Image (cartoon, grey):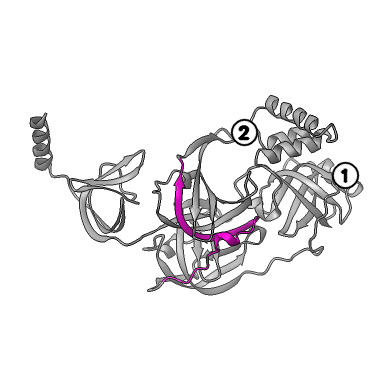
């Protein structure tokens, strides 16, 4: 069992260090804690304590949670592609935040009826299965923890066509996919917000988004709205959906920092009061990602903010106002609320008072971010223009940042470059 608890923190410390901490924890508890209990305490001390079911959509590839068994599917036999027989069974488990299915195969599936009963509370260490709603248990044991939840299996609401007034928060690059009939296509994922809250966006017809970029308010007709994983909301754009730009953005509700509740997803607004450098770390699969610690204040409270992956590498300035969409609230190591922003969320910088300018300069990618530099100065910009592009940008300059409204790529003036080089050489 302890090896599974170590898997929750194996990116933080070595197995030898983990075993040493377990021994120390047992000693500190006066030898009243067994090895499993001590391992749980060590995992908690390292900031990887149990999560709620709603928190299973977070960034962790492995997680630990408590839940109550509310339904058993029975054991089903099926034929594998190689002709062999297989067994599969599902336990539906729940806590006060949601429900999820635990999937078992073959010998494990056959043993379920003799091992667990409805209303048993279990501790699960697992990872995501093929479906985001399925959990593959690596270890499962009964526990005396009390879980307060509804014992009825929640039926998913049927998808429905809706019209909405929304704000496009983010759009990923198109990804190819293959349909069941063998034809290929592209899909775009992202995030959209309206007066109800945020929703995951899936667009199976990229042409629907022609001319639409993040930050644009839209009027949408014929979108397909459905329940997402773990109770979230999904909005699907397809061939029946029509979009048009809206004059005004929708009213998007935000949560005050003093009113944050752990194990919930929120949209918040505030000012960055402290920014630490982004740090790289190695995932369990060997890939490199990034994490960054900041502080966010809205006048009612100041809380830690943790950015992950691409959001951690964004150039940010102390004192800037931001809106953070679909972030996850959890209890930090100090016991205070902490906002975590990773997959499924987005950070937008809010322009403050500035001047409308037109700048002719060169796009440069530097460690501090993407700059538009000219003889009159340099500004941080959000652009996809390649490094070294000579361009004109028009927009609002707010301190060290330029919020571009339009971009125009220019051809380089060879004579001007030569004149500048000659002037530079003469000045040496």
Relative to 261, say whether 157 is above or below: below
Judging depth in this view, the residue of 181 and 73 nearest the camera is 73
Residue at (75, 65) in percent of width and height = 154
Residue at (64, 30) in percent of width and height = 13
Res 341 seen here: no
Instruction: Let me know if residue 393 is in the magenta part.
Output: no
Residue at image mark 1: 111
Quadrant in the picture for the C terminus: top left
Mark 2 element type? loop
Quadrant in the picture for the N terminus: top right
Image quadrant assignment for residue 357:
bottom left
Estimate the x, y position of residue 209 in percent, counting from the top left. 42, 63
Estimate the x, y position of residue 109 in percent, counting from the top left. 83, 46
Estimate the x, y position of residue 123 in percent, counting from the top left. 79, 46
Relative to 290, say whether 234 is above or below: below
Q: Which mark is residue 12?
A: 2
The tally of labels here is: 2
Residue at (46, 60) in percent of width and height = 169
* Left/right of residue 116 with respect to residue 345 in the rendered view: right
Segment tinted magenta in the rendering: 249-276
Q: Which of the marked residues, 1 or 2, is nearer the chain's N terminus? A: 2
Q: Decide: few, some or many residues near mark 1? Use Cα within 10 Å; few <14, some 14-19, many ≥20.
A: some
Inter-mark Cα distance, 1 to 2:
34 Å
* Left/right of residue 115 with respect to residue 60 in the rendered view: right
């Amino acid at each position: 069992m302890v090896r599974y608890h170590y898997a929750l923190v194996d990116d933080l410390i070595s197995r030898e260090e983990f075993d040493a901490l377990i021994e120390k924890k047992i000693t500190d508890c006066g030898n009243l804690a067994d090895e499993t209990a001590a391992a749980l305490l060590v995992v908690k001390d390292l900031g990887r304590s149990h999560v709620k079911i709603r928190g299973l959509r977070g960034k962790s590839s492995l997680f630990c949670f408590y839940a109550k068994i509310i339904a058993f599917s029975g054991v089903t036999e099926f034929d594998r592609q190689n002709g062999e027989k297989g067994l599969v069974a599902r336990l539906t488990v729940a806590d006060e935040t949601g429900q999820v299915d635990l999937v078992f195969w073959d010998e494990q599936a056959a043993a379920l009826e003799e091992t667990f009963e409805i209303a048993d509370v279990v501790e699960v260490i697992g990872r995501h299965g093929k479906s985001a709603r399925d959990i593959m248990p690596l270890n499962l044991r009964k526990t005396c923890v009390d879980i307060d939840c509804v014992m009825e299996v929640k039926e998913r609401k049927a998808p429905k066509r809706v019209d909405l007034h929304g704000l496009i928060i983010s759009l990923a690059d198109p990804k190819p996919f293959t349909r069941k009939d063998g034809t290929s296509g592209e899909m775009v994922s992202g995030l959209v917000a309206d007066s109800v809250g945020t929703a995951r966006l899936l667009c199976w017809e990229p042409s629907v988004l022609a001319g639409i970029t993040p930050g644009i308010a839209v009027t949408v007709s014929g979108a397909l709205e459905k329940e997402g994983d773990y109770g979230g909301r999904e909005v699907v754009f397809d061939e029946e959906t029509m979009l048009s730009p809206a004059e005004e953005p929708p009213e998007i509700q935000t949560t005050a920092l003093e009113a944050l509740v752990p194990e919930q997803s929120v949209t918040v607004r505030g000012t960055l009061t402290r920014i630490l450098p982004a740090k790289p770390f190695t995932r369990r699969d060997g890939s490199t990602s990034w994490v960054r610690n900041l502080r966010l204040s809205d006048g009612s409270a100041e809380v830690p903010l943790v950015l992950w992956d691409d959001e951690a590498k964004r150039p940010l300035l102390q004192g800037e106002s931001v809106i953070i969409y679909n972030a996850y609230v959890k209890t930090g190591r100090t016991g205070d609320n902490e906002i975590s922003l990773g997959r499924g969320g987005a950070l937008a910088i809010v322009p403050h008072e500035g001047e409308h300018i037109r700048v002719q300069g060169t796009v440069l990618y530097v460690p501090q971010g993407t700059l538009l530099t000219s003889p009159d100065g340099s500004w941080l910009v959000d652009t996809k223009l390649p490094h070294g592009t000579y361009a004109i940008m028009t927009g609002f300059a707010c301190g060290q940042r330029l919020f571009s409204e339009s971009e125009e790529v220019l051809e380089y003036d060879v004579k001007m470059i030569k004149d500048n080089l000659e002037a530079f050489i003469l000045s040496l």
